[in-house]
Image: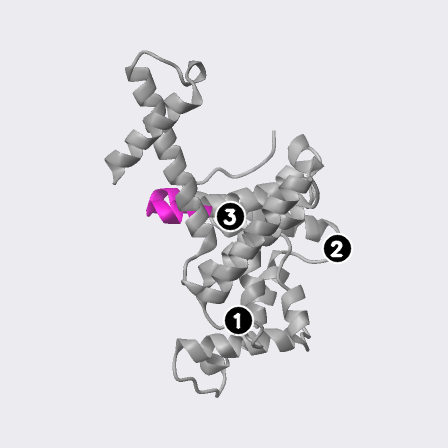
Amino acid sequence: MIDFEQKPSYDVADLVEIVRILRAPGGCPWDREQDHHSIRRDLLEEAYEVAEAIDEESPEHLREELGDLLLQVVMHSRMEEEAGRANLSDVADGICKKLIYRHPHVFGDVTVSGSGQVLENWEELKKKEKHQKTASDSVDAVARSLPGLWRAEKIQKKAAKVGFDWDSVDGAMAKLREETDELQAAIRDGSNVEEELGDLLFAAVNVARFVKTDPEGAMTAACDKFARRFRAVEEAAQAQGRELSSMTLPEMDALWDAVKQREA
């Protein structure tokens, strides 16, 4: 039994201590076995669950998910401390210094006209901080671990800043049609399908950027719409005393069209 004081409420220091105990000899075998790589997916999952709680506008859910995400930060920091490289205080020190450096209009004598100029200054300071001397450096700096559509959008925005962009959405749409044709040819020929599909998705993100639509948000909405309609189709089939697995595709399509008509 670990000697640990039970309290009515806890703070961040308590969380740090709990994680230390879990990772220490005599603690939790599972927690002790983990490293940065083994819980990498957990970190991503918790971040997405925070985003979902924000979308739900649920303060209680958000507080819970922020706690789960904070645990991931503390866990990774603890691993770094065990390796003798850094601890949570070092992490906090780094982000504090970054915020002060990137807000010279607050902590320095720089004057800005509005939030637009704040963002411009932020990007320039970030480039200096990351030693990004060229446009290619900025493109390469976009994290490869980002979701694909999000990464594509950020890369395109970086390129657009130096003028490498379509004049209007018409050019982006023409490129989308071109990539559709190339994908069809690749499918017909049975070669380079993955590459051409990627090019098509990249072109679709370009269109989204021009019409000021978040491609990730658009995809999420499309997935939600499909899931909602699919459930309605299944419920309609069950109302007829049937299961989808026993129906033909034309029969299911007819139910799908009926659902779409009700939503129109």
Q: Amino acid at mark 3?
A: Ala
Q: Is residue 52 magenta?
A: yes
109 and 87: which is toward the camera = 109
Range drawn in magenta:
50-63
Q: Are marks 1 and 3 in contact (CB under 8 Å)?
A: no
Main SS, magenta residues = helix
Mark 3 lies on a secondary structure that is: helix
Report the Cα–Cα distance between label 3 and label 2.
27 Å
| Numbered tag placed on residue 47 in the rendering | 3
**Could you say whether the residue bearing mark 2 is in a helix, strand or loop?**
loop
Q: Earlier in the sequence, mark 3 or mark 2?
A: 3
- Mark 1 or mark 2, earlier in chain: 2
Q: CA distance from mark 1 to mark 2?
A: 25 Å
Q: Magenta segment: does it hold 207?
A: no
Mark closest to the chain's N terminus, 1 or 3:
3
The coloring applied to the image is one colour
User: Which residue appears at 69% of the width and 37% of the height?
Assistant: 32
Q: Nearer the viewer, mark 1 or mark 3?
A: 3
In the rendered view of the protein, which quadrant contains the C terminus?
A: top left
Q: Which residue is mark 2?
A: 84
At x 75%, y 55%, the residue is 84
Give the left or right position of residue 109, taking residue 202 as reference: left
Up/down of 119 relative to 144, above or below? below
Quarter the N terminus occupies? top right
Q: Residue furthest right?
A: 83
Tag 1 residue: 99
Q: Looking at the picture, how far across and down is residue 164, in whole percent?
A: 58, 73
Q: For the residue marked with disc 1, what is the amino acid?
A: Leu
